[in-house]
Image (cartoon, grey):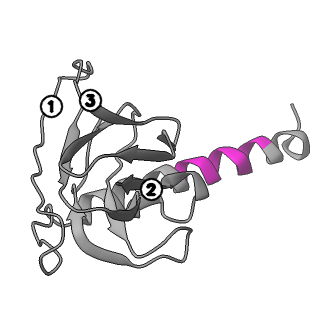
């Protein structure tokens, strides 16, 4: 194969390697889980667990982190409900509260999981009614890495 024909494949491969390396660098420099309660709002109750690559069944309200998205994107629950996010991707993700929807949102510090590897989970109990936006701050530039919990 000539260099001219192979060049596009080499460029795509190089871009993929650089992108994956960047994700790892961000995840490794990410801080520890935030335990701030945001000035009296919902009380955070984070629990981190590793299932050794296998996702253990979780009762209650769950959100899957998979294929660089949160499923469901919108979850409606009653006040006092614990929501558990589980990372089903091989890429590190996190769950971080924000002040609104979209890629231009700012983090609020109400809840934050810190980095979650494959099979790890994070839980938070929403004690007060409201609309709670969140994102994966590692991949915040991706629209699918933003979601919302509506508490009634």
In terms of sequence position, does the residue under pointer 3 or pointer 1 come before the other?
1
Proximity of marks 3 and 1: CB atoms separated by less than 8 Å:
yes
- Write the residue at 12% across / 59% down: 44
Mark 2 surroundings within 10 Å by alpha-carbon count, few (fewer than 14), some (14 through 19), many (20 or more)? many
Distance from Cα at disc 1 to Cα at disc 2: 24 Å
Q: Position of residue 101 (x, y in %)?
A: 52, 68
Mark 1 surroundings within 10 Å by alpha-carbon count, few (fewer than 14), some (14 through 19), many (20 or more)? some
**Residue 50, labelled with which disc?**
1
Say what secondary structure mark 1 lies in: loop
Viewer-closest of 4 and 109: 109
Left or right of 57 on screen, residue 92: right
Proximity of marks 3 and 2: CB atoms separated by less than 8 Å:
no
Q: Is residue 59 above or below residue 16?
A: above
Q: Position of residue 122 (x, y in %)?
A: 20, 44
In terms of sequence position, does the residue under pointer 3 or pointer 2 come before the other?
3
Say what secondary structure mark 3 lies in: loop
All told, the count of numbered labels is: 3
Distance from Cα at disc 3 to Cα at disc 2: 22 Å
**Residue 148, labelled with which disc?**
2
- Write the residue at 29% across / 62% down: 129
Mark 3 sits on what residue? 119
Distance from Cα at disc 3 to Cα at disc 1: 6 Å
Viewer-closest of 105 and 60: 60
In which quadrant is the N terminus drawn?
Answer: top right
Q: Is residue 49 above or below residue 147?
A: above
In terms of sequence position, does the residue under pointer 1 or pointer 2 come before the other?
1
Q: Is residue 46 above or below residue 49?
A: below
Say what secondary structure mark 2 lies in: strand
């Amino acid at each position: 194969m000539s260099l001219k024909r192979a060049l596009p494949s080499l460029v795509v491969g190089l871009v993929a390697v650089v992108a994956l390396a960047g994700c790892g660098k961000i995840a490794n420099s990410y801080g520890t889980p935030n335990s701030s309660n945001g000035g009296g709002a919902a009380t955070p109750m984070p629990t981190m667990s590793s299932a050794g690559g296998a996702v253990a069944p979780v009762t209650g309200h769950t959100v899957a982190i998979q294929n660089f998205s949160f499923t469901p994107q919108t979850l409606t629950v009653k006040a006092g409900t614990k929501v558990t996010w589980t990372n089903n991707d091989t890429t590190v993700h996190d769950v971080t509260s924000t002040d609104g929807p979209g890629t231009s949102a700012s983090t609020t510090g109400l809840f934050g999981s810190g980095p979650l590897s494959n099979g790890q989970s994070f839980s938070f109990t929403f004690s007060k009614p409201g609309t709670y936006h969140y994102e994966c701050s590692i991949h915040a530039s991706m629209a699918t890495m933003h979601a919302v919990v509506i508490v009634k």
